[in-house]
Amino acid sequence: MRLDLTGVMNTPGNTLDFDFMMDMSHVEMMGENPFTTGVHVHGQVENLLGDVRLIGEAQGKCELPCDRCLHPSQIQIDTDFTFYLTNDPEREDADRLFIEDGMLNLNEVARDCVLLAFPSQILCDEDCPGLCEICGADLNETDCDCDNTTIDPRLAKLAELLE
């Protein structure tokens, strides 16, 4: 969604609301398209006596395999974002976005914020035991009789320190 901000940028006290569904079906993560539905993005652009502020929220659901057992995991993404906007390229920095010709591509801003909100580890459950390191059995569904007490010989000296 492209927002025309010329009216907001030039008029202190002026505001512009936005509310739309963003399509993220083209986004690929770990070889899969995780977004099962669109991402709802809403917020406001407001001119605060010359400083133009963008405040928004994005919510969406996605599905990715669990990092431990590979079962499908539903993830709720909820993130909010705030940026200041400028039409002066000299004032652009990490928190101040440069707006060229009064137009803002809100899809790019919201997409980046949604992707940064992803958890570093995808888990189906906090207590997911994952897969057996030896036989590969799914420990959520079955117990295996593998001996997991064997210590890697490269780490044997560290085990001696614990004794």
Image (cartoon, rainbow, N blue to C red):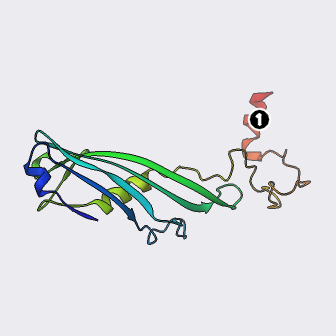
Q: Is residue 144 above or below residue 160?
A: below
Apparent side of residue 55 relative to residue 70 in the rendered image (left or right):
left
Q: Is residue 25 above or below residue 143?
A: below
Apparent side of residue 17 relative to residue 24 in the rendered image (left or right):
left
Q: Write down the quadrant of residue 13 in the picture.
A: top left
Q: How many marks?
A: 1
* Residue 88 horizontal/vertical position (percent): 9, 51
The one nearer the camera, 160 or 7, is 7
Q: Name the residue under label 1.
A: 159
Q: Write down the quadrant of residue 109 in the picture.
A: bottom left
Which residue is found at the position 10% from the left and 41% from the top?
50
* Residue 72 horizontal/vertical position (percent): 66, 62
Which residue is found at the position 60% from the left and 53% from the top?
122
Apparent side of residue 46 relative to residue 112 in the rendered image (left or right):
left
The kind of residue on which mark 1 rests is Ala
Q: Helix, strand, or loop for circle 1?
A: helix
